[in-house]
Amino acid sequence: MKNIKLWLAVIILVLLAAACGKAGDVTETTAPGSSDTAPALSGTDLVASAIQKGGCSACHVIAGIPGAVGKLGPDLSNISEVIPERIDSGVYTGDAKTTEEYLHEAITDPDSYIAPECPDGTCQSGLMPVSIGTTLSSEEIQAIIDYLVELPELVASGAVEVSSEAILGEAPTLTDEEFAWSKQTFFERCAGCHGTLRKGATGPALTPDVTLPKGTLALSSIIFNGTTGGMPDWGKQGFLTQEQTDIMAKYLQNEPPAPPELSLGQMQESWQLVTPVDQRPTEPQTTRDWENYFIVTLRDAGQVAIIDGDTFEIVSTVDSGYAVHITRMSATGRYAYVIGRDGRLALIDLWMETPAVVARVQTCYDARSVEVSKYNGPEGDFTDKYAISGCYWPPHFVILDGQTLEPMKVVSTRSYTYDTGEYHPEPRVASILASHYKPEWVVNVKETGQIWLVNYTDPINPTIKMINAELFLHDGGLDSTKRYFMVAANQSNRIAVVDLKEDKLAAIVDVGKVPHPGRGANWIDPEFGPVWSTSHLGEAALVSIGTDPEGHPDSAWKAVRVTELPGAGSLFIKTHPNSQWIWMDMTLNPDPILARTICVVAKADPARTYKCWEAATFGRTVHFEYNKDGTQVWVSVWGDASKPGETGEIIVYDDATLEEVARIKDLVTPTGKFNVYNTVNDIY
Ligand code: DHE
């Protein structure tokens, strides 16, 4: 036995030495299992090759295996020491009687028992592909088992250690058709989190140095099943078949293709002034309370529905861009600006009897944000004057005429990271918010971690103050005084706070894992005074930050309260000054029941959730919005566009009693919804 161990250790050391370089480096070798490795493998070569073929490194730490530093599954370096105790514990649900049998079962029938703890939280059933058992030969499976049985001693003797150096094989090939399909699907489904150039942000980087060591099997499993960290289960949800998932997994191991640029001239060519300003109404043409309209994203229909907040009638359904992301209103509320993921911006006149698009333009190929000029004060009246569109690709923002959408100015955000000064080719524009204090927009540049304050008094020659903040800026909103802007640096697990009166960074606050506030929620905590809260994608917690440096200096810019939630995967929270609740969803929780469960926390007793309930029998619940007077709350049930009867609906609740008031049924995949009055006045 001792000889075998020594032999294993020596070969591993040789392997590691061959793969030399600093941690994180990547070594090019011939792909295991390719024809170039024709001679039969034995010993540790066989173990390393089998582990890579099975994609085990993508999810597990396995000492001695180059690049095996995955965090989705349990650390396997000492697993064989844990197993006997686990088998005897009474909680084990499989059939194994010995360590070897347990390991065999774990590889060939992974869901027979789910380990209790994984590095990132609870271990997820269904993630480890059942097909590993058939992909690997019995010889390969046995080699892995033997290695894992010996591993604790090898680690203890110092013969092997954990190594992030990865082995790179050849990228799998795709047909032209498969490549074109993958490219388009990646843009539509994945680029938002992982970046068009796949350098990562909300989701991890997916460049070949990261994906090749994981291999097709592991990547495919992650894409199909999702992860507890917020990666959607595209296969389980029915968006991708197993075959499509495998094609995508192969595509990700190839170099990302460079997408095209978009010039101001090209934007101007796309510009359509459907109804010139002088042909539009000079006063509202409707007797409805248009300030209580909700502009509802019908995501997969490429439309928005304009719904009367008093009667719940659909006043108009308007074609907009692909997968509309958000809507913002002009400062008077009269115009709605709707931005699609494809960078198509539509301007809707809400004063028309039947609201319709009065102008369109394309400012990017991939966009998430739009905002308007709101300032009216000593420096001028900019009400309804300008708009700004923020792009993921090309990485830039565009200033437009607010009444016609004529593109006026494009500003690139390609720049250097705030901390190490590295050049970044794709710093994407995440949220944009209009200051009420100055004629400025707060533009959050995700990958460089800078918050740009863009002064629009002279939009062709804008001045920009660049504030160093934190990497991976995403979404955020104002505090209740509107003086401070709070933005999630989501992959940094922090909130950056900007003082819009002084134009400077006020604080960086540590919160939970992957904060995702939407625009957040402002309320008065009974102990800590005014706070702004965020929920999280990666952690089951609502975290509240003190926002009153004058009245409550001890709490200001600190995470003063953590309220535990039933699950992670939350995208949005909401409240209203008149409400006693904070509402929250868990849209991206991998458990389908939790994904359609909503919760409220009582402001008077914020230590725990007051009530959680499954709001629908299908789909996922997502995003809240109040009506104009703060008495009713709307939540979307995000269904499947291809399933009649389950495409989606909006549930309206009475905010005081939490009783259901109405269901607006058969909407196609409703997601975000924006009440005109609340959006204009930043009420949340
Ligand atoms: Fe969003 C806001 C980006 C996925 C619905 N989303 C935002 C903002 C950004 C953003 C930068 C802030 C805009 C602002 O305030 O100016 N969203 C992204 C992504 O990059 C991400 C993670 C992945 C992607 O591919 O787009 C993403 N978002 C989603 C969804 O899957 C949602 C649920 C449905 C959809 O449209 O695809 C979704 N995002 C929303 C909504 C808002 C939003 C409803 C506005 C919230 C608010 O109340 O302001």
Image: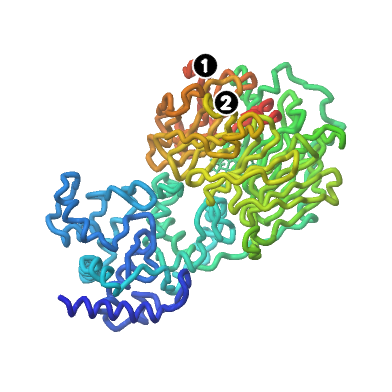
Quadrant of the rendered structure where residue 219 is? bottom left
List x then y, in percent, for residue 521.
58, 31
Quadrant of the rendered structure where residue 395 is? bottom right
Amino acid type of the residue that numbered disc 2 sits on in the rendered structure: Ile
Which comes sooner in the sequence, label 1 or label 2?
2
Can you see residue 324? Answer: no
Q: Residues within 10 Å of mark 2 (few under 14, many from 20)?
A: some
Between marks 1 and 2, how big is the CA–CA gap?
A: 17 Å
**Does 81 appear above or below 533?**
below
Image quarter of the C terminus: top right
User: For this rendering, which residue is in front, 35 or 571?
Assistant: 571
Q: Which mark is residue 384?
A: none
List x then y, in percent, for residue 244.
44, 56
Residue beneath the point at 57% across and 51% down:
192
**Does 185 appear above or below 571?**
below
Q: Which mark is residue 656?
A: 1
At numbered mark 1, what does the secondary structure look like: helix, strand or loop? Answer: loop
- Tag 2 residue: 524
Amino acid type of the residue that numbered disc 1 sits on in the rendered structure: Ala
**Does 91 appear above or below 331?**
below
